[in-house]
Image: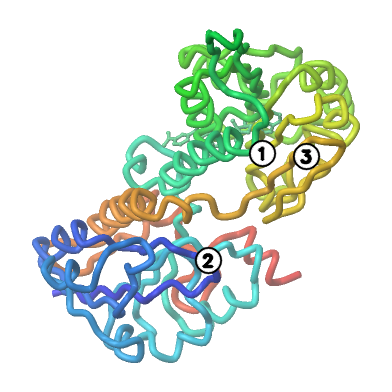
Amino acid sequence: MVHIAVPKETAPGERRVALTPEVVARLVKEGCAVRLEAGAGASAFFTDEAYREAGAEVVPAEAVLEGAQVVLTVGPLEASALPHVSHEAILIGFQYPHRDPKRVEALADWGISTLAMELIPRITRAQSMDALSSQATVAGYRAALIAAQLSSRFFPMLTTAAGTIRPARLMVMGVGVAGLQAIATAKRLGANVWAYDVRKAAAEQALSLGAKVIELPISAEGEGGYARELTPEEQAIQLEALARQVGQMDVVITTAQIPGRKAPVLVTAEMAGRMAPGSVIVDLAAESGGNCELTRPGETVEVGGVRVAGPLNLPSELPVHASEMYAKNLYNLCKLLLKNGELAPDWSDEILAGALLTHRHEITHGPTKSLVGA
Ligand code: NAD
């Protein structure tokens, strides 16, 4: 029998929970024992009672980590909790190693194995475990709604006795998982949608959702389906070409990211200044430096009549479905760790090896190891 623990999330404002009652029931069926901290699901509207009915043991904070072989979280487990975790345990959740390398050092020192959800390889076999994608889906949807909420104009075209309203002109820059969901949501709300990305594959996907694609003579396909960083020359061409387009938009949603780097600037303050007063920019890259020069992480500012939102942790704003999707990602990853009801991880498996951050007193992720060394 494998003992799984789910502590309550500690990050301020975090409303998600690692397991839902439905996934607890599945794990129990697989022969696992699940122990959950009382109230862990409350902010995602999952009651202790629902977890108990699903077969979990609901315990006070001080007892949740005791004897756990697997600890499941959404965000990083605080280093102060480590003395309560067995040295042999496996910790699984988002780890954000670059934000707090000292914490990763502490995990390695303690000897536990840590799997970082954001490091799971984006390969076909790992799609059902891909929490970056599941949570980006939530963020993209939410971004379009925030834009609609902040907009001083309707999104859809309306023909009324009081006149005809033209649809909002909306551009999504960065058409990965979040961007595609923002396009789909904005289309459903009736906006006239344009899309821009540096990857050709992204353009095809945007077209299939009914967006018009802005094409520039820059192609920046990087490794593993990601974009590479643009050269300063390419960046200058990009900004010059986009400036006119941005100026014609009522709404811009940006989601551009480059793994392990600061987000690229796609909307300068000058470009934002070209937008009509009452326009909106929603910057999903606020957490990693922002795609818009005016973005302030976690705030909505108004500059020259243009509202610029830099929301943080959007998945947490839709905690029921974000937790449901995340819990399924964890369940599929847990199944990879189990064999005949026992914990039997094959650390050479491509998915586990890719996601492994610390193992047997070592930091096993190269870039984090360098960061800690530096
Ligand atoms: P991401 O969050 O890393 O970046 C978002 C988007 O920003 C990307 O489309 C990227 O091309 C774009 N971007 C970066 N720099 C830019 C710039 N200067 N200008 C304009 N756009 C820029 O991306 P993501 O959503 O994590 O998806 C990355 C890739 O992974 C996609 O190709 C996606 O289809 C792929 N993917 C594969 C799987 C799988 O096979 N398991 C799962 C999920 C995603």
Q: Residues within 10 Å of mark 1 (few under 14, many from 20)?
A: many
Q: Position of residue 87 (x, y in %)?
A: 39, 85
**What residue appears at the point 28 percent right and 51 percent down from the top-left corner?**
328
Q: Amino acid at mark 1?
A: Val
Q: Dot 3, crowdedness within 10 Å: few (<14), some or many (≥20)?
A: many
Q: Residue at x 81, y 24 (%)?
A: 276
Q: Nearer the viewer, mark 3 or mark 2?
A: 2
Q: Residue at the location (69% across, 45% down)?
A: 309
Q: Is residue 46 left or right of residue 17?
A: left
Dot placed on the residue nearer the N-terminal end, 3 or 1: 1
Residue at mark 3 to residue at mark 2: CA–CA distance = 24 Å
Q: Position of residue 244 (x, y in %)?
A: 83, 16
Q: Mark 2 or mark 1: name the one nearer the start of the chain.
A: 2
**Crowding at mark 2 (Cα within 10 Å: few <14, some 14-19, many 20+):** few
- Label 1 belongs to which residue? 282
* Nearest to the observer: residue 72 or residue 2: 72
**Badge count:** 3
Is the distance from the Cβ of mark 1 to the nearest ligand 1 atom less than 8 Å? no
Quadrant hosting residue 259: top right
Residue 273, percent from left and from top: 87, 30
Residue denoted by label 3: 292
Which SS class for mark 3?
A: loop
In front: 262, or 18? 18
Specify the amino acid type for callout 3. Answer: Cys
Image quarter hosting the C terminus: bottom right
**Do tag 2 and tag 1 residues touch (Cβ < 8 Å)?**
no
Q: Quadrant of residue 254?
A: top right
**Quadrant of picture, ligand 1:** top right
Cα–Cα gap, marks 3 and 1: 9 Å
Please name the residue that numbered disc 2 is placed on: 13
